[in-house]
Amino acid sequence: MRAKCEKIFLVWFFARLFVPLHLLMSMNKEVTTKVMFQRAERLLGREAMERLGQQRVIIFGVGGVGSWCAESLVRTGIRHLTMVDFDRVSPTNINRQLMATTATVGQMKVEELRRRLLDINPEADIRAVTTPFNEETADSFELGSYDYVIDAIDSLADKARLILMTCETEGRLFSSMGAALKCDPSRIRVAEFWKVEGDPLARALRRRFKHAGQFPQRKFQCVYSDELIPNRDEEAAADIAVERGNGSLVHITAIFGFTLGSLVIRDVMSAADR
């Protein structure tokens, strides 16, 4: 009787130990992907999810805003994503950028973020581009081949160029205005570019367009906040061992990025409903 009980216990023990692993190893990619997006599909519907998987999206700048936008898109079903950023992770990025940790300092931002996104969905087509977007390289990005262009660029000149060029294509443009010097997430808004109020970056862009006599050929939506608070510690900004730049917080930059992602998701939903 004792031997029989011991045998039953051993069978139960090894079943508990190995069966979950066996089931996990035997799950094929199709089942994994289906389970992965089950909650999203339940909310958005199958047609919208299929459309999301077909869209080609490019994000320019994967810092405090763009990195969170990229993650939200991949976690919601975007399968074709190109990320453009020539910068490396620095210690000052750790407080707000998704892929920035003490372990990734010195690594290329887009490459580290690509690794993370492929861990989320190994079947996704994630491309990391380290070529900077500027006057010399702009044409090489073939903006017309994308359904959605996300602008999370800091440079005023390159941002203006990206806006002008994207508005000449059929792709949808969503742009982030300045996310620094802000602390109140309830003041984050979405508005058409020419209706953005209280944002210095939007004001500088409009002034640049007017001065050059070049204007975006169509309207586009922007994420912005009209909040503007001063840096409280100028000594930190003056420290030569620290990158210069205005203060910024992850609970602001991430919401900017998530909001940009939501604009893509909602636009695809609207197309599916038509």
Image (spheres, helix red, strand yellow):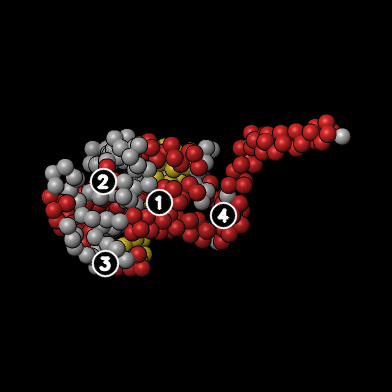
- Whole-number angstrom distance, CA of label 3 to CA of label 4: 32 Å
Amino acid carrying label 4: it is Ala
Name the residue tied to disc 2. Answer: 92
Where residue 48 appears, x then y in whole percent?
56, 54
Q: Do the residues labelled 4 and 1 touch (CB within 8 Å)?
A: no
**Residue that carries the numbered disc 4 in the rendered image:** 40
Cα separation, mark 1 vs mark 3, equals 21 Å
In the foreground, 88 or 129: 88
Disc 2 residue type (three-letter): Thr
Identity of the residue furthest to the front in this view: 2
Label 3 residue SS:
loop
Q: Residues within 10 Å of mark 3 (few under 14, many from 20)?
A: some
Q: Disc 4 and disc 2: Cα gap in Å?
A: 34 Å
Residue at (22%, 65%) from the top-left corner? 229
Q: Sequence order check: which comes first, mark 3 or mark 4?
A: 4
Q: Element type at marker 2? A: helix
Mark 1 surroundings: few (<14), some (14-19) or many (≥20) residues within 10 A:
many
Which residue is identified by label 1?
A: 69
Name which quarter of the figure residue 32 lies in: top right
Asked if the residues shown at circle 2 and circle 3 are in contact, with their CB atoms under 8 angstroms apart, the answer is no
Amino acid type for the residue under numbered disc 1: Cys
Mark 4 is surrounded, within 10 Å at the Cα level, by few (under 14), some (14 to 19) or many (20 or more) other residues, namely some
Which quadrant holds residue 81?
top left
